[in-house]
Image (spheres, coloured by chain):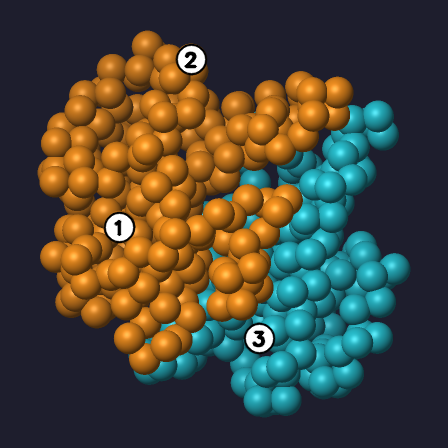
Chain colours: A orange, B cyan
Amino acid sequence: MKIYYSSSSPYVRKCMVVAWELGLADRIQKLPAAANPVNRDKNIVAVNPLGKVPTFVSDSGQAIYDSRVICEYLNDYGQGSIFSKNPTSRWLSLTEQALADGILDAALLARYETTMRPEEFQYAPWKQGQLEKINSGLDYFEGVAADRKGTVDIGTITLGCALGYLDFRFSDLNWRSTRPSLAKWFTGFSERDSMKETMPK
Amino acid sequence: MKIYYSSSSPYVRKCMVVAWELGLADRIQKLPAAANPVNRDKNIVAVNPLGKVPTFVSDSGQAIYDSRVICEYLNDYGQGSIFSKNPTSRWLSLTEQALADGILDAALLARYETTMRPEEFQYAPWKQGQLEKINSGLDYFEGVAADRKGTVDIGTITLGCALGYLDFRFSDLNWRSTRPSLAKWFTGFSERDSMKETMPK
């Protein structure tokens, strides 16, 4: 198994956290990638026309992406329980994955606004709209964080990677200041080996 | 069942095509929405902090999003076969969904570049990067289109909605000119009632 990899991508981290939780991390070969939304990595494009990381290649040579599909594939491969089969918890955890992915999508767009275009082309209301999504999403998780203690599923793993990315790239957001319950949850979750082994660099 | 709805959103269309294919469309109440990435719809934000369409609410009041999760929920509810349980076809169709969603994400970002920011803040290389993703993705589907004839799964449904969106918003892209096989596939797929009933407006 191979994965096109960047140590700073929160979506790659999500896949690698799942791999660590399932005991599969050392089975996956990491292929370095230099993907960004303006200059695409030609090696990745050959496998995934979107040219994005993570892109995964199975032992049989099948290309699998994006992070949601890779995580579910790894869970099936490792016969894990990170994707619940119980309907009630399945729809909740998949929706929480979508929300945490949405926080990440917004965070990446907010970051690209300043890193991918010269200053004169940066438009503050666009970035502001993205930051509002991040903050509304975090407020939701503040309300449920206490109930998620001890839960390791695709929802909480994605949340952990989203919060890790905010600490890595948006430290001035101070998301903890109004969200003590979420901050406490993240402190606990960050102690998992899967999270320690995948810290963004 | 309810769905926050916009007749121009390709992600809403995806959910409604799935609903039509499963015979569930008339069971879903459509709630009009005015969502955009800069000015968010407060009614949606109360249910989905991202404030995006589609957002779905089940009969028991559970909020379910985004389009991938809604489609899978509807498929389970209707005991359909739009999500394959066979591993080989499952990972292929989920990856093709991710690719067609990626084409749509790129198309929406390219469109937002001109509709969501004044002209002086528009940056051509950003839009160009998005158009490259669209074109690479379409080239992939040109290569497999003949093999997808007769297949109605989450991959082909998402592809149909992506091509419909390109015709709706990017008619000057002329995607058919270099992709005769894909054009032929789309002509056939567009004849399905589910596609006719959900044309973007």
Q: Is residue A6 visible?
A: yes
Residue corresponding to mark 1: A16
Up-down relation of residue B27 to residue A160 (above or below): below
CA distance separating discs 1 and 2? 26 Å
Q: Are marks 1 and 2 in contact (CB under 8 Å)?
A: no
Q: Residues within 10 Å of mark 1 (few under 14, many from 20)?
A: many
Query: Which circle marks residue B156 in the picture?
Result: 3
Find residue B103 and report its image quarter.
bottom right
Up-down relation of residue B61 to residue B74 (above or below): above
Is B102 on the left-hand or right-hand side of A90?
Answer: right
**Which subunit holds the residue at mark 1?**
A
Find residue A165 and report its image quarter.
top left
Q: Position of residue B142 (x, y in %)?
A: 67, 78
- Dot 2: element: helix
CA distance separating discs 3 and 1? 29 Å
Q: Are marks 3 and 1 in contact (CB under 8 Å)?
A: no
Q: Position of residue A156 (x, y in %)?
A: 25, 41
**Which subunit holds the residue at mark 2?**
A
The residue drawn where x is 31% and y is 44% is A13
Q: Mark 1 or mark 2: name the one nearer the start of the chain.
A: 1
The residue drawn where x is 68% and y is 50% is B130
Is A34 on the left-hand or right-hand side of A161?
Answer: right
The residue drawn where x is 37% and y is 63% is A56
Q: Mark 3 or 2, which is nearer the eye? A: 2
Q: Position of residue B31 (x, y in %)?
A: 61, 45
Q: Nearer the viewer, residue A68 or A120?
A: A120
Q: Amino acid at mark 2?
A: Asp
Q: Nearer the viewer, residue B84 or B166?
A: B166
Query: Which circle marks residue A172 in the picture?
Result: 2
- Dot 1: element: helix
